[in-house]
């Protein structure tokens, strides 16, 4: 008896994998992600609002002569962007992590794996989640946050509104400008006006050579100089007699080496400033201030577009690698530790970038790039596992 080889036409055709970005599996998983995201965000926001509101309850309910209920509602709504925006990437991680653990326990992951869908072929729901949450985080943090604090200041609700009140002049502050040392009180404006100004100018050997004093100084945008009204000028050095020249009916102009816009936002934290202000301040470092905090803030705002998506990918691929078919406390804790480590590293990078220890681009890009590298390596290792 002889056997002839089967003809090519008799072979079973091999099915090819086709991407279905909005298929049944994608819709089912994405809805689960979003549901857990909403639950976790609600819990975290409730805790954060309670911690934030409790110490300033009296200041909130008694603000502006409005009813306490109205003040509480307005305050809570205005605080949502500032409290929730920094937690959005980690919330995304937790939502994916909890969803994947639930699917592993129910056996759905095993069913999907037996159907021939590897982790690499199951990324569509995670990617779509990142595309939804990333831009939302940017809008919440970069647009709604500054707008909310501005409205809070207008309403005079809460401690931040009272502390950042722009209608009152500052206490006496000392500023190291590019042209000398300045002691003054700031009327924020805008435009900012300086009161009780003392300007100390030094020579290249750091010897004091001139002191200009004036009750008021105003900035002239056309010339880029400050007009000192009714000034008194001291000039001299260590080897010549002191000369004091009061000019009560005149004005003198000086380049104080400080940027007027920065004076208008003096004392306001970088997370409360709108994007266009951040961009301007990031270009004028050295004119009375360090630009590193503003550059770092911009870098993190731009990173917010992709960071939630990368955190979601990190949660998914680590769950697929460490808890593929059964959930143990040890392995689930390892996945959670990776997510919290990424979140904590991001906070550390903020501090290092704002203090100038590392460049702003590195501070904003380190966690997204490192997370993406971990995702790529884990996927490669999972796809090539025996």
Image (tube, grey):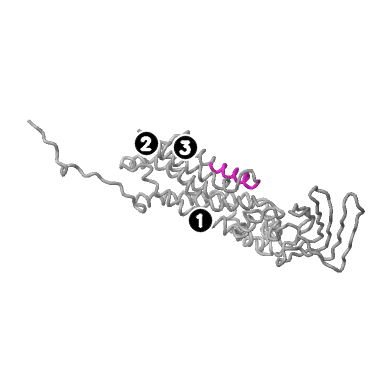
* Residue sitting farthest toward the right: 241
Mark 1 lies on a secondary structure that is helix
Q: CA distance from mark 1 to mark 2?
A: 35 Å
Residue 72 visible in the snapshot: no
For discs 1 and 3, the disc positioned in front in the rendered view: 1
Which labelled disc corresponds to residue 136? 1
| C-alpha separation, residue under disc 1 versus residue under disc 3 | 28 Å
Q: Earlier in the sequence, mark 3 or mark 2?
A: 3
Give the labeled residue for mark 2: 384
Range shown magenta: 342-355
For the C terminus, give its image quadrant.
top left
Q: Would you say residue 22 sits in the magenta stretch?
A: no
How far, Cα to Cα, is label 3 from label 2?
23 Å
Q: Say the numbered circle drawn on residue 233.
A: none
* Above-or-below relation of 110 to 256: above
The residue at which mark 3 appears reads as 332
Picture coordinates of residue 239, whole percent (x, y)? 90, 49
Residue at (73, 53) in percent of width and height: 178
Q: Residues within 10 Å of mark 2 (few under 14, many from 20)?
A: few
Q: Residue at x 75, y 62 (%)?
A: 187
- Residue 214 in percent (x, y) is at 83, 62
The 10 Å Cα crowd at callout 3, few under 14, some 14 to 19, many 20 or more, is some
């Amino acid at each position: 008896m002889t056997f002839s080889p089967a003809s090519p036409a008799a072979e079973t055709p091999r099915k090819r994998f086709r991407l279905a970005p909005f298929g049944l599996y994608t819709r089912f998983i994405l809805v689960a992600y979003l549901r857990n995201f909403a639950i976790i965000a609600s819990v975290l926001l409730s805790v954060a609002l309670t911690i934030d509101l409790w110490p300033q309850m009296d200041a909130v309910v008694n603000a502006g002569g409005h009813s306490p209920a109205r003040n509480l509602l307005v305050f809570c709504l205005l605080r949502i962007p500032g409290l929730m925006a920094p937690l959005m990437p980690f919330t995304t991680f937790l939502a994916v992590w909890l969803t994947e653990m639930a699917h592993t326990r129910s056996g759905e992951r095993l069913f999907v794996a037996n159907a021939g869908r590897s982790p690499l072929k199951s990324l569509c729901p995670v990617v779509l989640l990142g595309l939804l949450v990333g831009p939302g985080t940017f809008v919440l943090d970069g647009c709604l946050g500054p707008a909310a604090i501005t409205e809070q200041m207008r309403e005079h609700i809460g401690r931040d509104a009272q502390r950042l009140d722009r209608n009152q002049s500052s206490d006496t502050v000392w500023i190291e400008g590019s042209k000398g040392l300045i002691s003054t009180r700031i009327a924020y404006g805008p435009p900012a006006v300086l009161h009780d100004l003392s300007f100390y100018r030094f020579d290249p050997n750091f010897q004091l050579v001139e002191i200009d004093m004036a009750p008021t100084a105003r900035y002239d945008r056309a010339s880029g100089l400050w007009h000192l009204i009714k000034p008194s000028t001291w000039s001299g050095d260590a080897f010549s007699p002191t000369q004091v020249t009061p000019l009560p009916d005149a004005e003198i102009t000086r380049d104080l080496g400080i940027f007027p816009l920065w004076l208008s936002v003096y004392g306001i934290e970088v997370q409360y400033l709108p994007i266009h202000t951040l961009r301007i301040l990031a270009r004028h470092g050295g004119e009375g201030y360090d630009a590193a905090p503003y550059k770092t803030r911009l870098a993190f705002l731009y990173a917010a577009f992709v960071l939630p998506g990368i955190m979601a990918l990190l949660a998914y691929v680590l769950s697929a690698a460490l808890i593929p078919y059964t959930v143990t406390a040890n392995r689930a804790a390892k996945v959670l530790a990776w997510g919290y480590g990424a979140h904590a590293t991001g906070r550390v990078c903020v501090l290092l970038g704002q203090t100038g220890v590392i460049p702003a681009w590195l501070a904003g890009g380190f966690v997204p790039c490192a997370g993406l590298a971990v995702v790529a390596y884990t996927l490669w290792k999972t796809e090539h596992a025996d």
